[in-house]
Amino acid sequence: MKIAARIAFLLGLSVLVTLVARSGGQTILNELSGAGWLLLLLVPLHTLPLLLDVFGWRVLVLGPSRLRVLLAIAAIREAINRLLPVANIGGEFIGVRLLTRHGTPSGIAAASVIVETMLTLVSQSLFAAIGLVCLASLAATLRSSTGLLLGLALGLPAIGAIIALIGSGVIIDQVERLASRVYTIVVPGAPRIELRALLDASIRQLVRSPGRLARAVAWQLSGLLAGCLETWLVLRWLGHPVGFAAAAALESLAQTARSLLFIVPAGLGVQELGLIGLSHLIGVGADVALALSLAKRLREVLFGLPALALWQWGEESKTTLSVQGGAER
């Protein structure tokens, strides 16, 4: 997995550099400079979709939990997945450990993250379907009906693939095995049989609560829709305003491509190719699409670095306390 992620990273980076070079780096910088300091507003704005997503996660934590703690952990999870070469899954492992550290029983913490991960596939498939509907609603204003049909043809298999993954017991087993590894780190010496029993019991309790699962998906989907505001605002600030339906189509289908090719760290190249292809369908040039993508990546860095710093500070504090405790004993 590590080797594949490194290869995917290099390929994605090559694609990104090639796209920027073909569109003209100076042209893209000119687009971004037109928006100026307004792009910094994307950092606090991102709190809204993240908070809505946290509400969905909170529904799945079988026990008391503090919203601010979950929000901080969610920010750290996202930063790890977006900024570190972990193929978009490393943040979930850290999330289990951090949630356990804040008093949530390990089985409940692991189960909440496992079920949330699976429900994310549901909400993202619904989000992709909404994007396709929005794209179809723009058919009258599109320059090429062929382009629309191509976009639909590319999008529908993506949704089908996600739905197939949801129903795959193999995927759940793999996630449970990975969660087991995290659990044994959090609770050294814990019997693996006991671990699986705790995980299975918590997961079964969640799965048998359709109302709880539906609320979690609803919160996740609302967070994804709120994230469309970022695309809508950036294009407006860049001087190429589009309607919210067009912004939703761009955001949802680009995210779908990024989710399907999750092995590419940070979605390098994947996000850019997706935005360029979809932007063409609504009459936005490749340089504007790349400027949009780079604005998003700038927000990811500015929002994610403090979260990573908070995580590292917490790890160092924990290590220091452990060493001091050992010395006192």
Image: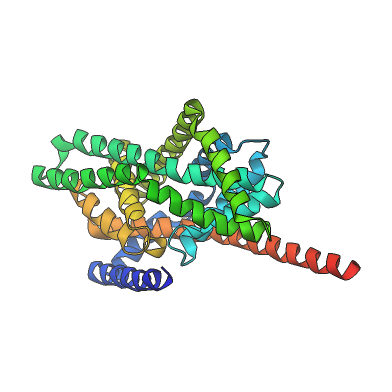
Residue that protrudes farthest toward the front in the picture: 193
Horizontal side of 123 relative to 64 (left or right) equals: left
Judging depth in this view, the residue of 37 and 17 nearest the camera is: 17
User: Residue 129 is drawn in which quadrant?
Assistant: top left
User: Hey, which quadrant is residue 266 in on the image?
Assistant: bottom left
- The image shows residue 56, relative to residue 274, as above or below, that is above
Whether 135 is drawn above or below 30: the answer is above
> In this view, which residue lies farthest toward the top?
211
- Quadrant the N terminus occupies: bottom left
Residue 242 picture quarter = top left
Q: Which of the colour schemes (rainbow, by chain, secondary structure, one colour) is used?
A: rainbow
**Image label count:** 0
Q: Where is residue 41 in the image (x, y as percent from the top left)?
A: 50, 49
- Image location (x, y in percent) of residue 19: 26, 67
Instruction: Give the camera-side residue of 173 and 33.
Output: 173
Q: Is residue 106 left or right of residue 253?
A: right
Residue placed most toward the observer, 75 or 186:
186
Image quadrant in which the C terminus is located: bottom right
Name which residue lies at 80% across and 69% down.
323
